[in-house]
Amino acid sequence: MPPKLRGKWALGITPRNFTWIIKDKVAICERPGGYGDNHRRVRRQEEIIWLRENRFDLVVSIIAAPHNLHAYQELNMPYRHRPLSGADDLDAWLRVFYAELRDLINNDSKIMIHAEEVGDRIVGIMGGYVRWSGMLDDPSQAIEITERICGRQLDSWSRELILRVHEIR
């Protein structure tokens, strides 16, 4: 059973690189607690508490390995593991992932999606979702808005994904 927290810690801390993709519906962040040598168990707990206290309905991990998924169970935070590895057929994975995400959004779920870090891969996947879902049909506009939301220029992999994602609808 997790320790009872008091004061401001009872509300947790915002996950690193927290970014709304669809305001009040879908956000991305770095893996709660950080990754690699920067991972901290206490920070992971505080960030999961923040997600729970801010009424996120679900955390979706796209990390290939199941590291730290037990922490969501321990803190009563619903989660799903949708691993994406370099060996996966990306188009097949995206079809399933995007359809599931669409269904969750249509059911008014508030979702946090995380990878190890907020890098071009997760940003491109989410920009691809914006186009795939029909929110923005023009690929140039989808790229531009994704870059604006995430405050960075996309790499060629991400741009390529957004350009061709309509083909997997």
Image (cartoon, grey):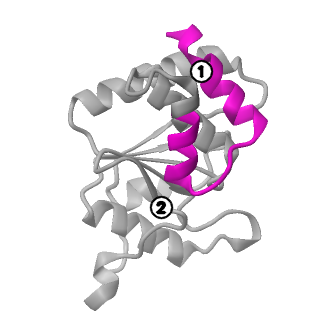
Amino acid type indicated by mark 1: Trp
Give the residue drawn at x 68%, y 63%.
Answer: 35
How far across and how far down the image is residue 102, in percent?
35, 25
136, above or below 68, in the image: above
163, above or below 54, in the image: above
Hey, which residue is sitting farthest left in the picture? 108
Side of 23 where 93 appears, left or right:
right
Q: Main secondary structure of the magenta part?
A: helix
Q: CA gap, disc 2 to disc 1?
A: 24 Å
How far across and how far down the image is residue 53, in percent?
26, 66
| Residue behind mark 1 | 93
Residue 148 included in the magenta stretch of the image:
yes
Find residue 46 and report its image quarter.
Answer: bottom left
In the image, 95 versus 137, the foreground residue is 137
Residue 126 included in the magenta stretch of the image:
no
Q: Which residues are magenta?
A: 142-169
Q: Secondary structure at mark 2?
A: loop
Give the residue drawn at x 50%, y 42%.
Answer: 145
Report whether residue 6 is seen.
no
How far across and how far down the image is residue 75, in percent?
36, 62
Q: How many numbered marks appear?
A: 2
Q: Upstream in the sequence, badge 2 or badge 1?
A: 2
In the image, 165 versus 139, the foreground residue is 139
Amino acid type indicated by mark 2: Phe
Find residue 152 and report its image quarter.
Answer: bottom right
In the image, 54 versus 163, the foreground residue is 163
Question: Are there few (<14), some (14-19), or many (20+) residues within 10 Å of tag 1?
Answer: some
| Residue behind mark 2 | 18
Give the residue drawn at x 58%, y 18%.
Answer: 165
